[in-house]
Each structure stands twice: as structure tokens, then as C-alpha cells.
Amino acid sequence: MKGFDPRWSDFPDYIIGITKEIWEDRKIATLHQYYSEDIIVRSPGSVVVGNKDVIGATMATLAEFPDRELLGEDVIWSGSPEDGMLSSHRIISTATHAGDGVYGKATGKKLRYRIIADCHAINNQINDEWLIRDQGAIVRQMGWDPKQYAHDLIAREGGPDDCVRPFTPSIDKPGPYKGRGNDNEWGAKYADILTRIMAADMAAIESDYDRACQLAYPGGVNGQSHRDADRFWMGLRASFPSADFKIDHQIGRDDPMMPPRAAIRWSLNGKHDGWGVFGIPTGAEVHVIGAAHAEFGPWGLRREYVLFDETAIWKQIALQTG
């Protein structure tokens, strides 16, 4: 790990270790060390530029969820210490909504939800990040409907003219990381499966997913087998049938004591012009950022984890349709 603190045994150890330090050990000040001053953090709900705003957002989250834990399920990565490395870090977070904040008045609700964070690191420092939380799971556990929450958030942020704008390519900021991942066969295989599904070849699910596959989807939804996979991907694509699907980043890994696996960051860009999981077609222009991890076995894709932010999609629709 050239350029990194020698106490980290490898890149996953670094990513999991600093995450625990910052959030659970309350060493928030280490963000001055671990994050570059001009870091760009993109999430479906916003673009944050600069470490000062990242530190402020971290403190605000911990004020609202003081017992938050971040349990690293996996780190799928590419690159080298010399040229920079990109980690796709899948996390299960647990927290109690014990303080007032962006989710409204404290409810005391105990939450469990997933996050996928793609981070570029070089010389012991992160300087570029994509962050997707399962906002649908968070707000549902608090008693909100994602659409209702998005409408309420717009009002609390000052209305349609003054609220925080959800991420779209038009407000993106160029970051230092220009890579696209690696050419490992498992990343290429998963990218091909998703591309086929998004091109309406739903038969790819039966041919390439293990019949006993385990599935984790937005909203905290868990499923298994072909029917649940078909229902999820069909419902998403049916909402945006003419949108452009793009693989934005892909990684494949073969590691000891781990199944072959892949991490894909993808996007849908276009109109909400179909009947699907987002209800009545509105014609609104929508940008969906998605992140997905997959594990493969002898009978095909055996585990799949997919995230996007339902509330950010509803917010985009609301800002265009009222």
C-alpha cells in the first residue's frame, strides 16, 4: 500500500477502518486527513464540494442519529496505490432517529438500511466519491412514503425555487478520478447482464441468475429467485422505457475466500414516460444513479444488491410537475 499509512493491511482494511474511525469512534476531525480539501461528493440528492461541507453534513447526521453504526459487508475495488484506487464499499447501517434533522422531528425509530459508496483514494486520502443511501428504506421505517417525503422536503428546504437540487449531469463537477474500473471478466459479465435487461431482454434473468438467488433491492426489499428479480427490474425499466441506460463504472474481482463478484455504477437518463413503480407517467426528465453488487456461483448470479434513491427520483418529478 505505497503512499498509505502502514497500519492498513490492504485497501479494504483502509476503507472499512477509516469509516469506523470517522463515524463510530467520533474522530470526525480525521476527515481533514482522510478527505482532500476540495473533494467532490455526489449523491442522488445533491453535489457537495469541499471537505468543510462534508464535515458539516457528517456532524448533522450524527446529531440526528447519534448511535449510528456502519457495518462493512464488502469492498470491491480496482486500481493500484501508485495510480489511485477505487473502492465500492457496501455497508449496512443501523441507527436510531433520536434527534431532529433532515428527516424531521425525532421519531425514536430504529433503522436498518444499506449504502454503497464509491471512493477514489491515493496517498492515504479520498478525493472523489459517489454515495447512494437507500433513502426509500430510511423514510419507510419512519412512517413516510418516499413520494410524500420528497414533497415535504421540498417545502422544508424553502420551496421549489430554493430547495437543494437533486443530482443531474448538468450540475456535476469534474473530479480527479477519470477511470472506468477494470476489465475483469466478472465485472464484464454483470455489465452485460444489466445491459441486456435494460434492453428488454428479461430472459437474461432466467438464463444468468441462479434459480435460488438472494436479492436486496431499494426500499429495504429482499427477494429470491427469478420472479422477484424480474419484478424489480421490469418495474424500474417500465417507468423509464425510453431513458438511456449507461454503465458508468465496472469492477470485477477474484479474491481468496470470496466468490467471484462485481460492482457496477449505472445510470438511467430520460423521461418518466411509462407505467411502472413510479406510478402515472409524468413526462418529467429524470436522472437515476444506481449502484449494484453481484456475487456469482456455479449456477449463475447468486446474490445481488442494488441501490438507488427513490426520494431523489420523486423530488425530480415533483420539481417539474408540481
Image (cartoon, helix red, strand yellow):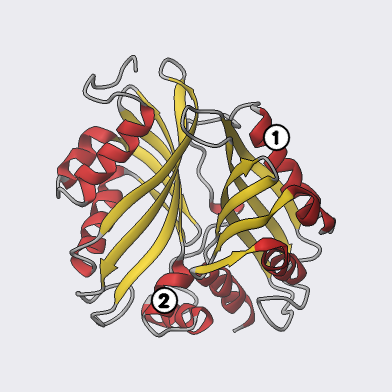
Quadrant that contains the N terminus: top left
* Circle 2 SS class: helix
As shown in the figure, which amino acid type bears the numbered disc 1? Ala
Dot 2 or dot 1: first in sequence order is 2
Q: Nearer the viewer, mark 2 or mark 1?
A: 1
Relative to 265, is 166 above or below? below
Q: Nearer the viewer, residue 304 or 60?
A: 304
Viewed as shown, does residue 248 lie left or right of 195?
left
Q: Nearer the viewer, residue 155 or 267?
A: 267
**Do the numbered discs 2 and 1 sit on residues whose CB atoms are within 8 Å?**
no
Residue plotted at (78% across, 74% down): 274
* Circle 1 SS class: helix
Label annotation for residue 139: 2
Residue plotted at (48% across, 71% down): 136
Quadrant that contains the C terminus: bottom right
Viewed as shown, does residue 42 lie left or right of 20?
right
Snapshot quadrant of residue 107: bottom left
Q: Nearer the viewer, residue 71 or 146?
A: 71
- The picture places residue 4, in percent across and down from the top left corner, at 29, 21
- The picture places residue 76, in percent across and down from the top left corner, at 49, 36
Label 1 neighbourhood size at 10 Å, few (<14), some (14-19), many (20+)? some
- The picture places residue 289, in percent across and down from the top left corner, at 58, 55
Viewed as shown, does residue 254 lie left or right of 226?
left
For marks 2 and 1, give the CA distance.
34 Å
Label annotation for residue 23: none
Relative to 35, is 216 above or below? below
Residue plotted at (51% across, 59% down): 44
Viewed as shown, does residue 264 lie left or right of 175?
right
- Where does label 1 land, which residue? 188
**Residue 198 visible in image:** no
Residue plotted at (65% across, 57% down): 212
As shown in the figure, which amino acid type bears the numbered disc 2? Val
